[in-house]
Structure formats: C-alpha cells, structure tokens
Image (cartoon, coloured by chain):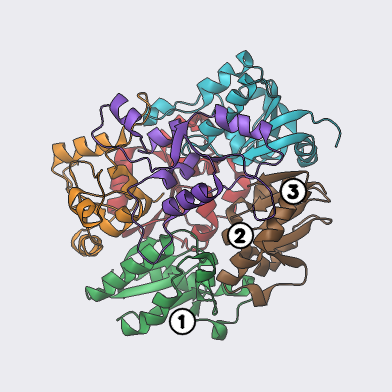
Chain colours: A green, B cyan, C brown, D red, E purple, F orange
Amino acid sequence: MSRPDFDLLVILTQPPLAGTAAKEGLDTALVSATFEQKTALAFLGEGVLQLVKGQQPDQLQLKGIQSMLKALPFYDLQAVYTDALALQQFGLNPDELLLNHQPATAEQLQQLIAKTTNTLVF
Amino acid sequence: MSRPDFDLLVILTQPPLAGTAAKEGLDTALVSATFEQKTALAFLGEGVLQLVKGQQPDQLQLKGIQSMLKALPFYDLQAVYTDALALQQFGLNPDELLLNHQPATAEQLQQLIAKTTNTLVF
Amino acid sequence: MASLHQLNSIQKLPHCLRLLAAGDQLLLTETAVTLVLDTESLQQLPSGVELLALADDLLARGLSEKLPSGVKAISDAQWVEATLEAERVCSW
Amino acid sequence: MASLHQLNSIQKLPHCLRLLAAGDQLLLTETAVTLVLDTESLQQLPSGVELLALADDLLARGLSEKLPSGVKAISDAQWVEATLEAERVCSW
Amino acid sequence: MAAGHSIYRVFFYQEGVLVANALSCPPQDETHLTEAWQQLAEEHQLELVVCVAAALKRGIVDAKEAARHGLEHHNLADGFSLSGLGQLVDSLSQADRTVTFTS
Amino acid sequence: MAAGHSIYRVFFYQEGVLVANALSCPPQDETHLTEAWQQLAEEHQLELVVCVAAALKRGIVDAKEAARHGLEHHNLADGFSLSGLGQLVDSLSQADRTVTFTS
C-alpha cells in the first residue's frame, strides 16, 4: 500500500443525544489530532443530523457535541466528510449545516477507508 | 373494551444470545403466569430464531433460553405466537421449530395486542 | 382510541411498523424523532395512524422548525394525557 | 486483500453495506450470523465481497447446518489469520 | 403528578438498574440521574424498586447481597430497594396504566 | 497468541468499561467476564487499560478516584488500570493491527 492519507478515520453514525458514543468518538478524534496523528472525521447515516444547526440539548438537561464541533477548526482536524445519501434522505442542505464539510458518495467513503491506516466506528 | 383475552403479552424481538433481554422477557412471562395472570408470548422478527432447534450456546460459554422454552409446557403459558413473515424471511419451516406455537400474520398480532391489557417488548 | 405506541429509536421501526393498526397513535421520542425528516420511512406508515413527536426531543435536536405537516408535536403534559386516553401503551 | 469488515449486529448492516468495496471481506460475528438465513439481505451485498461467518457463533445458534453455499464458516484461529492478512480491520 | 395522577411504583430492570449505582460520577455539567431519581422519589413518596437478578448481574449490590456474595463493598444508592420480578407483575395488575421506558 | 503474535494492550472504553466492575456477580453457570480477563492478563502479561472518563461516568472508580470524588467505596477490579484516551491513540499508532470489538 502506498503511504496512507490518514492515520485514523473516526466515523460517527449516531443521531444527536443518543448516549455517549458520538462524544466518545469525537474525543478520540481530537486526542488523535492532538497527538499529531493525521485524523479524518466522517458523519454517516443518522450521524449527519449531528450537524443540524440550532440544537438545544439543554432543553433535556443533556449535552450534545455541537459545541465541540464548533471548536474543531482550532484543532488540526480539517478533514470532515458527510454522507451525501443521508443528507438527501433527511432533506438537509449541506450549506445549512455546521462545520466546513465535504459531502461524499459511498464510493468516495470506501476510498477514504482504503487510504487510512485505522478506522473506528462510533 | 370487552374483557381482554390476556393480562400480559410479552414480545421477544432479540435473536439468540444477544445480551439478556430475551431471558429477562421470558422470566417476566413465567413470573406473570405463576402469579395466575393470563399470559401470552410472541416471537417477532429475529426473535423467531430463538426457536431454532439444536442450538449449542455452551460453545460460547453462554446460556440461551432454549432450555427454558422447553420447560414452558409445565407452566400455565400455552399461548405462543410466531411472526409468520419472519419465519418466511428466514426460510424456517414452523414444524421444525421448538415449542407448540401458532404462526400469526401482522394483522393477527395487531389483534392480539388489542385484546391484551399490557404488552411488554423485549 | 386504541393503542399508543412509543418508539424511541429508529432501529426498532421495522417491528413497530408492522404492529400498528388503524386508529393507533405512534409517538416518536428520544432519537426516533429524527424520523420526521425521513420522508421515505414516513410513507410506510399505515393509513389511519396519528403521528406524534415529543416537542422537547425535537427542540433539543434542532428539528422543531423542520416538522412536516403530518406530524403533531406534543408537550410532556400532553404525553401523560395521551397515555391515559389510550386504551393501552406499547413501548418499543 | 483490502479491508476486513466485522459486523456483529444486523442493526448496523445498512451502514456497513454501503462502505463495502469489491475485494473486501465481510465477517459476520455474534448475532449478525443470523444474516446467513436472510436471503433478501444477502442479495444486497455488492459483488466481489467474500462473506465469512464465525463457526462458533453459527454453531451456538443452531445455524451451522443451514449455511448457504456463498458463506464460508471460519474458526477463531482463521479469524486471527484473516485480521493479519487484511490490510485493515473495520468493526461496525 | 401535577395533574393529580399517582404513581404506584417505579420498577428498574434490564439496563435500567444501572441508574441505582451509587458510585456513578457523571461530569458536573450533566444530570446526575441517580440523584435526580432520589429527589423525585423523596418529593413524591415514590417506591423505587430495582430487579435483584438484573442488578446482581450488572454489579449493583446492597449491603445484604454484598455480604451474601462475600464482597467487600456495596453500591446500591439510597432510596432504591432490591426486589424480584413479582413486584413488576404486581404493578402491572394493580395500576390503571403501565408505561415502559426502554433503552 | 498461540501462533506467536503478541498483544500490545487491551483498551476498554464506551460500554466495555463495565467489565472492570469488581462487584459483578453473574449467575454461577455464566462466564464471569471480569475474572476471565484477569486470568488471561495474568497468563499472557497483558495490559488492561480502562478509559477513565468512560469509567467514572458509569460508576467504575479506583481507590484514588473514589477519594477524589468523596465516595466511600471503590470497585475497579484488580489487574485493570484507569488511563486516558491518549493510551488508545498510542496503541493505534504502535500496533501492526488494531482490532476493535464493539457493543
């Protein structure tokens, strides 16, 4: 294999406020970036709903990951992909979402995995 | 509502050896029958796979619910329904399965819920 | 009023969907409220089923403004009323 | 050999299915071995993907005798080998 | 409850028993569920019953069960009591309406 | 391991941290997972590391964390140690192959 593009790809599949998996995945991605590992993040399926603006988790005395997502640009983690099919399924306009992200087809996501050393799914 | 047919319907939806939900559901149904509540049991979706014969959970040092199922006839719990569509989906012949059970269509299962006071899903 | 079905995760939708009867209500709670955006899945609902979603769960996930016309958002107090008005409650 | 995908629950199949590439292997473990009976879902697998299932998980659930021709049962030792032969392992 | 309805019993089983772990320390900005149930129960005189079989399996023990299993420590939170599935069946038959919250 | 491969580290996070609860009492005819890991670790000199943030949230504490949070009891099983996510990232970059077991 040629030198991989990324050391770690973290895939987030959970919708907002579904237990702690999304937060734990994001924590892992941020720690990885902090340790100077080349790190990418992908939102798959219901995971794309994490990027919906105007979420108010305090309404349920919960904490979402949106405030962490807004802080991403300050970490060395700029490779953010979203599942284009899921965006379409949920009727979400990519431009209306949080974060600078790149909608990707299933084929593009397959290639991303193929060019990454380790992939963790949350 | 006219007098219900059953006090409690327990629906098992989990495949074999998927955590403790199926066992906990079956425990609840058996305790209910022991307390002289009219109790019914239904296997829905992947739950029908609990009735496949020849399971060897000890292979994984686990305990399935099959030995408990074989003891059902000794409790006052004879109303056992299976999801006919799921049986077809998994290519299971109703006669090849454990227990004396009645395959039921979605409509028949809907009527079962309508004629039962409480339904718990496991 | 027949059964009130409570669905708290879209993973359980396939089972729940088949046991919904005309006259029943389906209440979306917790993460299942994301279904309100999933037009394709909503079309699979049998006719004669009223679709409800918990207002706080929608709000928390930023979905209140995106509610399609066929879904009614209800408060926690209305939820309690709905459990008492229904003949029975079935939680998936 | 490209990626070895490990799937331990059919709930996660929809995600996993879309990220399988030709040349990948899909290993069914734990409750996901029930997929071997689900002909309709198996037909959705992209071509060029080798389908494996853990022998012990099949045996424990009484499915060893019901294995369709397209699925290969493997032992725990073969599983370890498969993780080393693959370029990477992706667990769903 | 504000509308005059009364709650007969709250029964914790399956994964729900983990709420009764007195050693849980969620981050300070998250709701401490164990404490929230304790407060609610105290204010409204609710009975909080935890399924004993489900609890033991998941490492939630009271002083009595700890002694019985030879364990040094125990962790069932105050306000919760361990009991059997019979209590669930009793609640089902006594209450006008049963509402389940699944995981 | 029988085939000569070595295991760098076992990292428990998310729901996996519940394995390290020393107070678990599964029924006698079921595998006691906590003890099984302890035995395996002793036989093969494995390092069993539990994610500290995930553990605290789920009520798994060692003596030090219990003291820090003013708790009377602690329940981290012997043979396990609490540590941060940095250990997971270190393992990912050091090992030839990482295999994850999800819940």
Same chain for mark 1 and mark 2? The answer is no
Report the residue at 27% width, 70% height from top.
A31
Q: Give the quarter of the image for residue F2.
A: top left
Q: Are marks 2 and 3 on the same chain?
A: yes
Of badges 2 and 3, the one in the foreground is 3
| Kind of residue indicated by mark 2 | Ala
Residue F99 seen: no
Q: Residue at x 73, y 47 (%)?
A: C18
Per the image, the residue denoted by label 3 is C84
Determine whether, in the image, residue D32 is placed left or right of residue C14.
Answer: left
* SS assignment at label 3: helix
Question: CA gap, disc 2 to disc 3?
Answer: 22 Å
Amino acid type at image mark 3: Leu
**Residue named by callout 2:** C32
Q: Residue at x 44, y 30 (%)?
A: E53
Q: Residues within 10 Å of mark 3 (few under 14, many from 20)?
A: some
Q: Please give left or right for residue F89 compared with residue E83 in the image.
A: left
* Residue kind at label 1, given as amino acid type: His
Q: Position of residue A46 (x, y in %)?
A: 54, 65
Which of the two residues, E65 or A74, is positioned nearer the viewer here? E65
Asked if residue D8 can be seen in this view, the reply is yes
According to the image, label 1 marks what residue?
Answer: A101
Q: For this rendering, which residue is in front, E95 or A98?
A: E95
